[in-house]
Image (tube, helix red, strand yellow):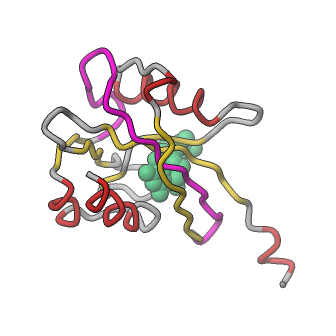
Amino acid sequence: MSEAAEAVPTVLVVAVALVDPDGRVLIAKRPEGKQLAGLWEFPGGKVEPGERPEAALIRELKEELGIDVNEACLAPFVFTSHAYDSFHLLMPLYLCRRWSGVVTAREHAGLAWVKPNKLSDYPMPPADEPLVAWLRDLL
Ligand code: 523
């Protein structure tokens, strides 16, 4: 492996598939000015050093969507990874069917509740794309 390849950091990001009682999944549009702007992601964010992944996700969901999630309601689902240009992203996706509060776009450019078989109509970051087929099979 070259030195340049070794220098690429791995970034741990946690994400969630919130599933509503009709079986629809929440996706959120990344805002202008951020990496991957305009693409629809499963909400989440970076895990801070020393932070447990579940705690990071609970924090991000409060910050980004204004909802409270009990850790017991987070079902670990599947890992995805992708080599972006400047970092390798490693991302577990959790499944969550229960939360309190009203889902609100505090940091995203838009939100959509989408049936799993329609998720592929929305352009997503490459790390998120493989999750669509897994969700379609699962839900
Ligand atoms: N992804 C990604 N998919 C996905 C998420 C939540 C994040 O591909 N479902 C990527 C997008 C960013 C990186 O992971 O490149 C970190 O995500 P996030 O949301 O924390 O990124 P930014 O742009 O908000 O970064 P900071 O402003 O540094 O927090």
Compare residues 56 and 37 and report the one nearer the observer: 56
**Magenta stretch encompasses residue 89:** yes
- The quarter of the displayed image where residue 24 is located: top left
Q: Is residue 39 left or right of residue 68?
A: left
Which residue is located at x 54 percent, y 57 percent? 79
Q: Is residue 4 above or below residue 54?
A: below
Q: Is residue 10 left or right of residue 18?
A: right
Residue 55 position within the rendered picture, expressed as x and y whole percent measured from the top left:
59, 27
Task: Determine if residue 34 is in view.
Answer: no
Compare residues 114 and 139 and report the one nearer the observer: 139
Compare residues 32 and 122 and report the one nearer the observer: 122
Residue 48 position within the rendered picture, expressed as x and y whole percent measured from the top left:
68, 35
Q: Is residue 126 above or below residue 64?
A: below
Task: Determine if residue 109 is in view.
Answer: yes
Residue 100 position within the rendered picture, expressed as x and y whole percent measured from the top left:
32, 15
Question: Could you tell me what secondary structure mostly forms the magenta stretch?
Answer: loop
**Magenta stretch encompasses residue 17:** no
Q: Residue furthest bottom?
A: 1
Residue 82 position within the rendered picture, expressed as x and y whole percent measured from the top left:
55, 68
Range covered by the magenta-colored residues: 85-108
- The quarter of the displayed image where residue 89 is located: bottom right
Which residue is located at x 70 percent, y 31 percent? 51
Which residue is located at x 64 percent, y 67 percent? 86
Which residue is located at x 53 percent, y 44 percent? 14
Give the position of the N terminus as an image quadrant: bottom right
